[in-house]
Structure formats: C-alpha cells, structure tokens
Image: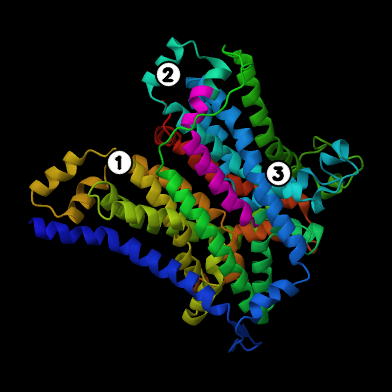
C-alpha cells in the first residue's frame, strides 16, 4: 500500500504543476527568442539579431519612460512602507478592536485596479473633482503623483496586513521580557518590534517594488488624460508597442524579456525574504520616549488610514448619483442636488454583456483554481512533497507580473482559435490565481490535523482518495479565503482581456462564448475621450466593487484567522 500511496500523491501535484510549468516557462523562454525577430503586417517573422536591443537606445520616449520607472520604484515602496508601519503598530495597540477593523481596512485591496484608478482620477479632476477646491492650478491628470497615489491606495492595506501579522506573531516571552526591562511605547517599538518584523517589511518592500516596476492600470486610465509617454513606465510602454503595431512585437518582447530578468532577481529576493527569520539591531536615538502613547494617537492614525482609503470611494458614490449636467456645473457641487439612479440603470443595460463575461469567466476560474491549488497545497503541506522546491517555484510565479506572459500566450491562443473567446481567458486566468491560492491553502494545511489523513490511509485509502474524502470536505475555511483572493484577481484582471479580446460577449449567440471583453474594459473605456461619461463611469466603478466587498464580508471570520488575528 505504501508504494501505491507514494505514487498517488502525484495525482495531487501534477495537474497544477503541469499547467504552471507549461504556461509560465514557455512564455519566458519565448520572449527571449522573439527578441531576436521582427514581424511584418502579415505576422511573418524575420531574424534581425540584436536590432531590437539597439532600438532601445533609439526610442524617443525611452528617456522619460526610464525616469518615470525609476521614480515609481524609488517612491512607491518607501512611501507605502512608511505609511504602513504606524498603521500596523496602532492596530496591534488597539487589540480586539484592531482585529475587528481588519476586514474593513483591507477592502480597498480587493477592489479592481481599474476602478481604483478611475475613482482617483475622478476625485482629482481639476474641473469637477475635489481638486477644484484644493489644488485648482495643478493638473493631476498629467502627474505621476496620481499614479503613485493610486498604487499606494491599493497596496497599503495588504502591506499593513503583512507587517501587522509580524507584530502580533512576536512571542509572548519577548513581550514580557521587554516589559520587565521597562521598554514600552516607541522605545520598545524601535528596540524590539521593528527589528523582529524586518522580514515582513522586506517581503512587503520587495513585492511593492515589483508592483512599481509593472504598474499598469493607473497608467492605462491616465494615458487618455495625459498623452503618450507622460506617465508611462517601461512595462506599459512594452504593452503599448505590442498592442498598437504588430511590427513592433519583437521590440515589445525585448523590453518584456529585460523586465523579466529584473523581476527574476527581485522575485528571488522575495522568496528568500519569505523564508527568513532574523533580527536586525537598529540604532535608536536616546530621546525616543519609553512610555505608551495615548490611545487617542492610535485612533488618529487609524482614522487617517480610513480617510485616505475611503474618501475616494465616497466621492465616487456621490458622483454616481449626479446627472451629467450637474457634473459640469461650476463650481462643482459636493453633494448631488437631485440624486438619481439613472447612471446605474444605464450601466446595467449597456454593460450587461461585459458583466456576464466577467462573472462567467471569474466563476469558472475560481472553481478550477480552488480544485488545482488545494490539491497542490495539500501534497506540499501534508505530505511534504517537493516542499522547498515547489514552494520556491510557486513564490516565483506569484511574484511574476502578468505582463510577461502576453506575447507568447497571444500566439498560443491565436493558434487555438481562442482570441476574443471566453475559453481563451479561462485557459490563461489560472496563471494569475493558482500561485496565490496555493499559498493561501498551504498556510491553511500547515495547521491541518495530519492524524486525519493518516487514519484515512490506515483504512486503505490512497493519498488522493484521503484528500477527496477527508481533506477537501474539512477545508471550507481555507477555501473561502482562497476564493476571495481568486475572485478579486480574476474579476479585476485588465491586462489579459485587453490583450486577448476585442469585442463584448455576443448575447445573440450565447453558446458560442465569443466576444470576451470584461467589465474592467467597459469601465476603462468610459474614461476615454471618445466616451468621457464620468458619472456613468462612477456608477460602473461602484458596481464593480460590490462582488469583492460582499465576498470579503462573507469570509471575514476565516480571513481574520488566516491573517493571524486573535
């Protein structure tokens, strides 16, 4: 039986592993190969050697693009970490109240990227946004600071969560020893807490750096407002070259290959940080006080967080209730004079095909991902199958931005006849969701009673059957948390639908599943100069937040347990 069991564990691992290796390794290698070729208008390829690499030096936009990329990488991680540290510390100080606030505080992290960008651009519009009153002479639409604000807004909640999980994991013995030595308040934070959470800070910093290199959604939304090259980073420029001219796809592959090299080095650092346990002694100025700060200060820090994270959402709600005529009134009104739901009715009518595609593809992807990732994680966590190597590979894929895959996958989907088809998205979306779902389920199965699996095997079950009969039914809590992440990643995915689709779902022939543009594309298109229907865009953006928010609230208790809340 033991020999049989050793083999059946492969059936838990292979489905996810074969998929990931096939759909991630091939694109990375293909980008390198494509970088030596150029395409003509018929899609035929020609070997050009290093010409694509030489084009980088001749690209007229490359100077501003490299400058923007550098500024995003320099500012975004530092600013996010600096804001997250006091918020995480205040959350810990508030104890049970901090735990209770967690599900609400992380909601912005699950809102689609395109919606986050839209709400900030609407709020900072100099004609009908709050910027009219605060900064009337500053054009936020053409500022990289708008891009940075959107990304900080999106990433800050999860950065707070990672650092907070580190703070509440500090052993009780160390807390008691610090109290016995008279270390409390800010001095304890610098002497004890901060050195112990350096690994969590490093994890967040590296992951945020990767995000900064590959910022996409805010630049895509701001592109129509600011013009070419003003906000672009290297990643967006590569996508633009791929999307606008088939003859430049070799050049786009070159840029993406170079970005993948940078990403690989950062991803390796990220993986090492995840497995690191070390303490760094930091120099602490003598004037740092050793007394607890008043709780009012901690309430103030949390209050600032809520203002920063939820004012854009409130502004979008108010805008969505205005008529187009009221929107253009000068000065802009804060509250709608005559609230109307007509924008929501219009969005639900015009955007129905996009919503159906998003719900359909997302639902299928959630099901596929949960099945594959739960099997994969169970084999790694419970049976220790390929533990360190498979976890390292999973983390690497999790830290690899989706843009890297689009050029080779486009060729694959074109060959399969799946461009602008639901099944093209269903085939590719798991690339973005299996790694994060595997990580969630791995953490869940780390605390799974192994006696249950052992008892099942003693009754003659194989490892595969033990998982299906015993492990999976007892995994509801972990699966609910994984479902929240998978749904959010799928529902808000913008890059793959932009690259692989070009029309909305064909409601006249629904079983063909042709036309696969998602709701994120619909929201982005409403911000374009051709449409420029901002009140309708606000309504669409708010509608897009409803499913992920409901899921977070539904799974909030399991989310708190998974995040280490007490």
Is there CB contact under 8 Å for labels 1 and 2? no
**Number of marks drawn:** 3
Per the picture, the main secondary structure of the magenta-coloured stretch is: helix
Q: Residue 74: where, in percent of width, then height? A: 67, 47
Residue beneath disc 1? 446
162 w.r.t. 499: above or below: above
Q: State the residue in front, 348 or 427.
A: 427
Is there CB contact under 8 Å for labels 1 and 3? no
Q: Which residue is depicted at the point 87% across and 40% down?
A: 132
The answer to whether one can see residue 6 in this image is: yes
Magenta span:
191-216
Q: Is residue 255 left or right of residue 534?
A: left
Q: Residue 546: where, in percent of width, then height? A: 57, 44
Q: Secondary structure at mark 3?
A: helix
Which of the two marks, 1 or 2, is nearer to us in this view?
2
Q: Which residue is depicted at the point 64% across and 30% down?
A: 306
Residue beneath disc 3? 149
43 w.r.t. 528: above or below: below
Q: Quadrant of the C terminus?
A: top left
State the CA–CA distance, disc 1 to disc 3: 36 Å
Q: State the residue in front, 83 or 561.
A: 83
Residue beneath disc 2? 175
State the CA–CA distance, disc 1 to disc 2: 25 Å
State the CA–CA distance, disc 3 to disc 2: 35 Å
């Amino acid at each position: 039986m033991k020999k049989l069991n050793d083999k059946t564990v492969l059936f838990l691992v292979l489905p996810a592993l074969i998929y990931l290796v096939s759909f991630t390794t091939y694109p990375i290698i293909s980008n390198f190969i494509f970088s030596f070729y150029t395409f003509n208008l018929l899609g035929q390829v020609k070997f050009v050697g290093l010409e694509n690499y030489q084009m980088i030096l001749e690209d007229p936009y490359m100077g501003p693009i490299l400058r923007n990329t550098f500024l995003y990488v320099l500012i975004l991680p530092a600013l996010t970490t600096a804001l997250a540290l006091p918020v995480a510390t205040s959350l810990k100080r508030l104890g049970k109240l901090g735990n209770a606030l967690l599900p609400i505080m992380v909601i912005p992290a699950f809102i689609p990227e395109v919606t986050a960008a839209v709400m900030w651009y609407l709020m900072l519009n100099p004609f009908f946004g709050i910027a009219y009153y605060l900064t009337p002479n500053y054009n936020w639409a053409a500022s990289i600071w708008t891009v940075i604000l959107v990304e900080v807004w999106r990433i800050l909640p999860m950065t707070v969560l990672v650092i907070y999980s580190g703070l509440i994991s500090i052993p009780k013995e160390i807390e008691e020893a610090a109290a016995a030595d008279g270390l409390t308040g800010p001095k304890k934070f610098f002497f004890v807490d901060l050195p112990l959470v350096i690994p969590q800070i490093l994890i967040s910093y590296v992951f945020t750096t990767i995000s900064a290199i590959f910022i996409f959604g805010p630049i895509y939304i701001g592109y129509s407002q600011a013009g070419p090259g003003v906000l672009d980073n290297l990643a967006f420029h590569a996508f633009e070259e791929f999307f606008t001219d088939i003859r430049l796809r070799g050049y786009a592959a070159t840029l993406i290959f170079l970005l993948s090299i940078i990403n690989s080095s950062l991803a390796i650092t990220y993986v090492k940080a995840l497995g690191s346990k070390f303490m760094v002694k930091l120099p602490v100025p003598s004037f740092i006080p050793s007394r607890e700060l008043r709780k009012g200060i901690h309430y103030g820090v949390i209050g600032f967080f809520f203002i920063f994270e939820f004012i854009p959402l409130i502004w979008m709600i108010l805008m969505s209730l205005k008529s187009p005529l009221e929107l253009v009134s000068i000065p802009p009104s804060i509250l709608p004079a005559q609230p109307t739901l007509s924008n929501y009715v219009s969005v639900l009518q015009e955007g129905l095909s996009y919503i159906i595609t998003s719900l359909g593809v997302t639902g299928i992807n959630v099901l596929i991902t949960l099945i594959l990732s739960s099997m994969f994680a169970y084999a790694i966590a419970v049976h220790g199958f390929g533990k360190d190597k498979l976890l390292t590979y999973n983390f690497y894929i999790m830290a690899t931005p989706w843009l890297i895959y689009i050029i080779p996958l486009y060729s694959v989907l074109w060959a399969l006849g799946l461009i602008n088809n639901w099944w093209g998205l269903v085939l590719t979306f798991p690339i973005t969701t299996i790694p994060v779902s595997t990580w969630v389920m791995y953490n869940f199965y780390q605390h799974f009673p192994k006696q249950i699996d052992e008892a099942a095997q003693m009754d003659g079950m194989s490892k595969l059957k033990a998982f299906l009969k015993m492990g999976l039914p007892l995994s509801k809590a972990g699966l609910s948390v994984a479902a929240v992440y998978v749904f959010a990643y799928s529902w808000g995915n913008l890059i793959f639908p932009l690259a692989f689709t070009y029309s909305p779902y064909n409601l006249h022939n629904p079983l063909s599943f042709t036309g696969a543009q998602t709701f994120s594309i619909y929201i982005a298109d409403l911000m374009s100069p051709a449409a420029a229907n901002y009140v309708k865009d606000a309504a669409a953006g708010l509608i897009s937040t409803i499913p992920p928010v409901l899921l977070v609230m539904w799974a909030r208790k399991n989310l708190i347990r998974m995040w280490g809340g007490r």
